């Protein structure tokens, strides 16, 4: 009676069954890894885009800062030239005053 309730599997099918189970597990792991890689790729893409925006903003800020520095340097050079001319004019006036007193 116990022989009627049992399932008999031929022994040559056992390696095939084990291979099928291991194949199913490997496929499941692969699908899981692909899903995580997709999530990571999306997250990395968002981070990279934000970094690119910040770099562009920093580059623009640096360009503005460089332009301001150039303007300041040009202004200082102009002030120096004006100061030299003013010093020359004052020197000429002082010499004229000194000659007028003599």
Image (cartoon, helix red, strand yellow):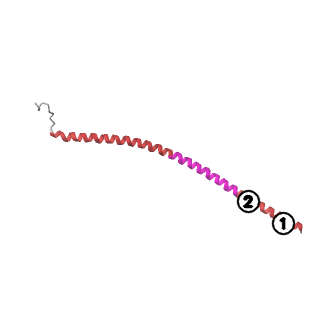
Find disc 2 in the rendering and name its residue.
81
For image coordinates 46% across by 43% down, the residue present is: 45
Callout 1 crowding tier (Cα within 10 Å): few <14, some 14–19, many ≥20? few
Q: Tags 2 and 1 in contact by the CB under 8 Å rule?
A: no
81 relative to 20, above or below? below
Find disc 1 in the rendering and name its residue.
95
| Residue 63 part of the magenta segment | yes
Q: Secondary structure at mark 2?
A: helix
Name the spot of residue 12 as percent of width and height, x first. 16, 40
59 relative to 87, above or below? above
Precedes in sequence: disc 2 or disc 1: 2
For image coordinates 75% across by 58% down, the residue present is: 82
Magenta span of residues = 51-76
Q: What secondary structure do most residues of the magenta stretch adopt? A: helix
Q: Would you say 53 lies left or right of 86 here?
A: left
Name the spot of residue 60 as percent of width and height, x first. 58, 48
For image coordinates 84% across by 66% down, the residue present is: 95
Please give the label number shown on residue 15: none
Q: Would you say 56 lies left or right of 74 here?
A: left
Q: Quadrant of the N terminus?
A: top left
| Residue 95 part of the magenta segment | no
Q: Quadrant of the C terminus?
A: bottom right
Q: CA distance from mark 2 to mark 1?
A: 21 Å
38 relative to 4, above or below? below
Name the spot of residue 16 as percent of width and height, x first. 20, 40
Q: Would you say 74 lies left or right of 3 here?
A: right
Callout 2 crowding tier (Cα within 10 Å): few <14, some 14–19, many ≥20? few
Q: Would you say 40 lies left or right of 96 here?
A: left
């Amino acid at each position: 009676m116990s022989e009627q309730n049992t399932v008999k599997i031929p022994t040559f099918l056992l390696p095939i069954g084990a291979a099928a189970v291991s194949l199913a597990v490997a496929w499941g792991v692969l699908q899981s890894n692909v899903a995580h890689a997709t999530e990571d790729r999306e997250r990395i893409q968002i981070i990279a885009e934000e970094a690119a925006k910040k770099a562009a903003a920093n580059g623009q800020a640096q360009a503005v800062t460089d332009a301001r520095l150039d303007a300041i340097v040009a202004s200082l050079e102009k002030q120096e030239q004006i100061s030299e001319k003013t010093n020359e004019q004052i020197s000429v006036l002082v010499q004229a005053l000194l000659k007028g007193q003599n």
